[in-house]
Amino acid sequence: MQGGGIPIDLILYAMIAAFLVLRLRSVLGRRTGYERPPQPDRAAAGYDPRGARNADGSEAAAADGRASPALPSGQPAARRILPDPRSPVGQALGRIRSVDSGFDPNRFLEGAEAAFRMIVTAFAEGDRETLRALLSEDTYAGFEQAIAAREAAGERQRTEIRGVQEIAIEAADLRGTIADITVRFVSDQVNMTTGRNGEVVAGTEGVTELTDIWTFQRDLRSSDPTWKLVGTRSA
């Protein structure tokens, strides 16, 4: 471009970077207003990792039907919360089980946590293959767009899940054989985006508590055991 003006491609990259910041907030959640200091070992302090209505300790299956991976070293188990069976959400879970006799809410939550960790990590690393296997087509398209914008801007995303504090089933629905379950995740994360030269574009080295509301969906008559992510929002 002549006359010393700003090249149009730099303007486009700046617009992409601004879009990416907004997209990251919608995909991964938002800050809740404070950074969490290092936490003590809650198990040693008498914390009951099973919560009020937790699983009985049997091995759980991940969201794609495989055994759930072990928690990262040093991370306590998340508190898992299930709705009262008499509540509307609890009754919806009962209807899901009437169609799929193998469905168990506790095992579902363990699988949901495994999927949460895999999806958050895959998004940060730009792992499209993993995301495609765990997301619906529409949801994958949104994630892929954000990854492509990040790559075009020459940026890198660093995400570390330092701990998942709480997982709770917030809503459930059954339409024919299509089941939707909405889960609230409260986690401690480090999220930081760096530019081409390693400069910090967004985020911080500090640990921030994030609350994410994710909806998973599955056709209960399908031979595919995967509950796929179909929607995300921040609380």
Image: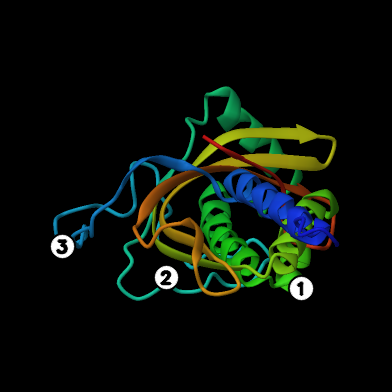
Q: Are marks 3 and 2 in contact (CB under 8 Å)?
A: no
Real-space CA distance between mark 3 and mark 2, rounded to the nearest whole angstrom:
17 Å
Q: Residue at x 75, y 56 (%)?
A: 6
Tell me which label, 3 or 2, sits earlier in the chain: 3
In the structure shown, which secondary structural element does the residue marked by tag 1 occupy? helix
Check the picture and name the quadrant holding the N terminus.
Answer: bottom right
The three-letter code of the residue at mark 2 reads Leu
Q: Position of residue 92 (x, y in %)?
A: 65, 31
The residue that label 1 is drawn on is 129
Q: Quadrant of residue 78?
A: bottom left
Real-space CA distance between mark 1 and mark 2, rounded to the nearest whole angstrom:
22 Å
Disc on res. 171: none
Q: Position of residue 70 (x, y in %)?
A: 45, 74
Q: Are marks 3 and 1 in contact (CB under 8 Å)?
A: no
The residue that label 2 is drawn on is 71
Q: Dot 1: few (<14), some (14–19), or many (≥20) neighbours within 10 Å? A: few
Q: Quadrant of residue 118?
A: bottom right
